[in-house]
Image (cartoon, coloured by chain):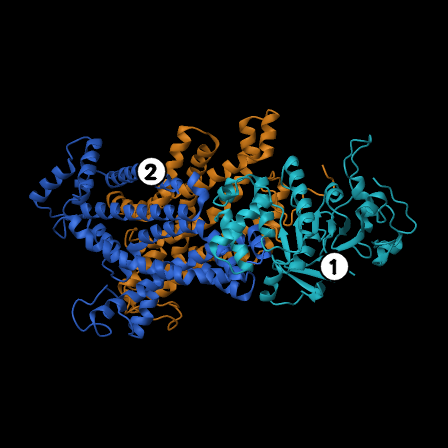
Amino acid sequence: MSATSSGGEKRPVAAKGRRRSAGQWAVAWRRFRKNKVGLAGLVLVGFFVLAAVYGLFWAPYPPRSFDCLYQGCTSLPPFVNWAHPFGTERSGIDVYSEILHSIPNDFYVGLGATAISVVIGLVIGALAGYRRGFAAALLLGLTQVFLVIPVLVFILVFARIFILEVAEGFGLSLITIILGIFGWPTIAYIVRGEILRIRELEFIQAEKAIGASSGRIVFRHIVPNVLSSIIVVASLLIAGNILTEVVISFLGFGTPNVSTLGLLLNEGFSSIRATWWVSLFPGLAVVMLVLGFNLLGDGLSDALNPRLRE
Amino acid sequence: MGNLLSVEDLRTYFFTEAGVVKAVDGVSFSMEEGEALGFVGESGSGKTITALSIMGVVPIPGHIVSGKVVYRGDDLVGKSEKEMRTVRGKKIGYVSQDPNSSLDPLYTVGDQLVEVIRAHKETTKQEAMDEAASLLKLVKIPEPETRLKAYPHELSGGMRQRVAIARALAGQPELLIADEPTTNLDVTIQAQILELLNELQAQFRMALIMITHDMGIIAETTKRVMVFYAGMLAETASTSDVFGGPRHPYTSALLAAIPRTDRKRDLVPIPGNIPNLIEPPTGCRYHPRCPYSKDICVQTIPPWEVAGSGRLVACHRWKELKLSVG
Amino acid sequence: MGSLWVYVVRRLLFMIPVFLAVSILTFIVTNAAGNPISIIRFGIRNITPSQLSFLESYYHVNQPLYAQYFYWLSEFVQGNLGQSLVLGGPVSGLIGPWVLTTLELQITALVLSLVIGIPIAVYAAKHRGTVGDVAVTGTAIFGFSMPVFWVGIMLILVFSFYLGWLPPSGAVSAYPPYWWGNQYLDAIAHLILPATVLTFASIATFVRLIRANMVEVLRQDYILGARASGVPERSVTYKHALKNAITPVVTVVGLTFGLALAGAPATETTFSWPGLGYQFVRAASVLDLPVIIGITMIITIMALVANLITDLSYALLDPRVRLE
């Protein structure tokens, strides 16, 4: 074997699948810190977290409060009265205050649904990827079907039927669970793909050859590598789930007395001519929040799966 | 001076986020018609980028920063794309190392050969197909007419490499650059491909630049060799002179690193790492790994000087050192 | 080309279990909270006894669950989707025009996003790292972080209410005066805003993907090989690079079309575009279950067909796939 080089490659590629020791995560973190896109995303998300916390304590009005009905400040345009910087709705609800109250709810749905999807998807994807045989093929088929069908339509039907029939107090959690249940295929598919790829890598064969147990192989080698893919997809999934929740609430399929950005957009749309600001500001909030998670996901993707350039 | 190709002080840099990578930093040489020249060195030493610079296909973010590439009296650096297209494939052909990715998987072998043929002359599709079939025959592919309709993934690695060679020859170039053509192939196929290249060279009196990291291939296919290190040349001489008595410590180390069965000896690797091309070592770039380095080696870049008939070397101490042959 | 036909047949056969799986899923979803009658009762308080008895027999509520499924499925494949409880008349008759209306919008948007998106993506990939590329990528990420319908609302505010240049809703004007003179131009005027919104959303996704693929493809050896052999640059870019970059994207086009169909409810509601999505929302608000189920299945089938078409296109473009 020539000791001078490993084969004249013009473009060196990071050996994917190297064992992720603690050092690897540190390297990834350092790379992430340099990545402007990811940092921007992190800043945006962090900003909204702070806004949520701020809203818990210092929001000017309680959630869904119609104070302005009595005080005569309904349908106020924005920037006119600094007690209502983003204006008020026809029903008297203050837009700025409502946005603050909505943020933690939207976080709850986005993160909660993604968490559920990750757990289910991880298990199913791992089973489909690691084991061979009929069960695995079945799971794969199931995953593919879910990826193809227009899931939103099913979610809407589900949401509609359940929220009417079941108690209203659980509305938000119900939506979270429904989104979580319909979101697992994305994760499962990626997990399965990663596992298939890693399983064939040489160092796994080596471990098997020295007699390491399946459990050890899974935990010490496969999981850390799959984890990085999951982290990236999770970030994008959170963005997607928040957007989906917004659509659900906008169409009136959500719960009517829980503050969410989608609900605000719904109310804004019904009086679009009279109070256009009720559509503008919550929409901007959605864009920035979703953008934050998308940028974060992009940054994480660059940091965790590097491709060295020339 | 070479009557085919003459490269003068070529510098090609890559402008990346991490810094400026000086991939080729002052390379000069010349070639005659029909000559078989070798480029040898580790990965990252600049041999491939030199070849790409000659052809004007350096990938972004790289540019030729200075220097001349004179082909039959005509400087290629700074020519327009249109002018270069009459050179690429027609005067200079190129075969790259990975047979798995050097052919477009979406088109048949025939389509890809015809494409190159028709890029260089006016022919009908049928005539081009016939010519493609004879090209395949030339590279010793059995049943060429059937193979024309095959897709790359339907062929073995060795056959794909032959097709790649056929494509490089489709424009009937005077100079063929073979960039590690056998690295990704089985050893037995390797020998066949090298033999094919030798035959083709003899048959068409074609000049050949053989790029490799393997000194064994240099011995088999070239008459003269250039040793690259870290973007610059360490030495150049006839192949037999280099094997008989290298003048640069790096060349000697390369020879020593070849595993041999005729002598009882452990493998002798070259200590240290490939140098960073963004901030290369000062003075002689090899000095951190050289067992003979002295202060002058750290401070000054060694001059490229004559060290015998047809020999040039860049080492401050070449006159004093008696280097082993490995 | 023999392997291509085998592939086609295999994909068609595969569609059957998928269709069954989807039908089971629909059945589960609509029955999950109780039998159809109780659900409908929830939404429509004043059901007449004749409607009630019809429903009971249509849904075979007195039979066990799996039997209900089979009865429903057999009716469905014969084209009998039941009667709308609110609009009157058979669902199958109502759905036809709705499908066409939705397709009018979706296909216009799809074509526009490909025609505009592909050149943009190619440009961005070839000029990677330059200001133009960063601008394109940045806009794209922004683009798919926006809720599609919200963009629509903003556009309506500006172009309909503020400027008055375009109609804010509907697919056509029901009676004169027509926008822009005659009925055809009127239809086009109505199409502009919703199509723009959908196109914008799809372009964002396409550009990102095509650009990423192009960047990868442009690094490949066969691009270098072709260039080094003297093949003209335009051939290299379009014949080799783009075709290789597009093939995986073709699948995504199908997926995106499916997503756009799924998102039809929101977009169509915003513009009161009377297609499947719009009618779906209306039916769902009043729990007109036969219509809900009918539209759900139709939208799903449309997504499946789109997916099949893209799979076949993929096989046409990339010969390696036909072996799978």
In what quadrant of the picture does the C terminus of chain A appear?
A: bottom right
Q: Is residue A261 left or right of residue B31?
A: left
Q: Which chain is orange?
A: A
Q: Position of residue A99 (x, y in %)?
A: 39, 59
> Residue A187's quadrant in the figure?
top left
In what quadrant of the picture does the N terminus of chain A appear?
A: top right
Q: Which residue is mark 2?
A: C14
What is the number of callouts on the image? Answer: 2
> Residue C79's quadrant in the figure?
top left
The foreground one among A301 and A137 is A137
Q: Which residue is mark 1?
A: B25
Q: Position of residue A172 (x, y in %)?
A: 34, 48
Q: Position of residue A81 (x, y in %)?
A: 37, 72
Mark 1 burial class by Cα count in 10 Å: few <14, some 14-19, many 20+: many
User: What is the chain letter for disc 2?
Assistant: C
Q: Is residue A108 left or right of residue C105?
A: right
Residue C139 against residue B161 in the figure, above or below: below
| Type of the residue with mark 1 | Asp
Mark identifier at residue A117: none
- Residue sticking out furthest to the right: B320
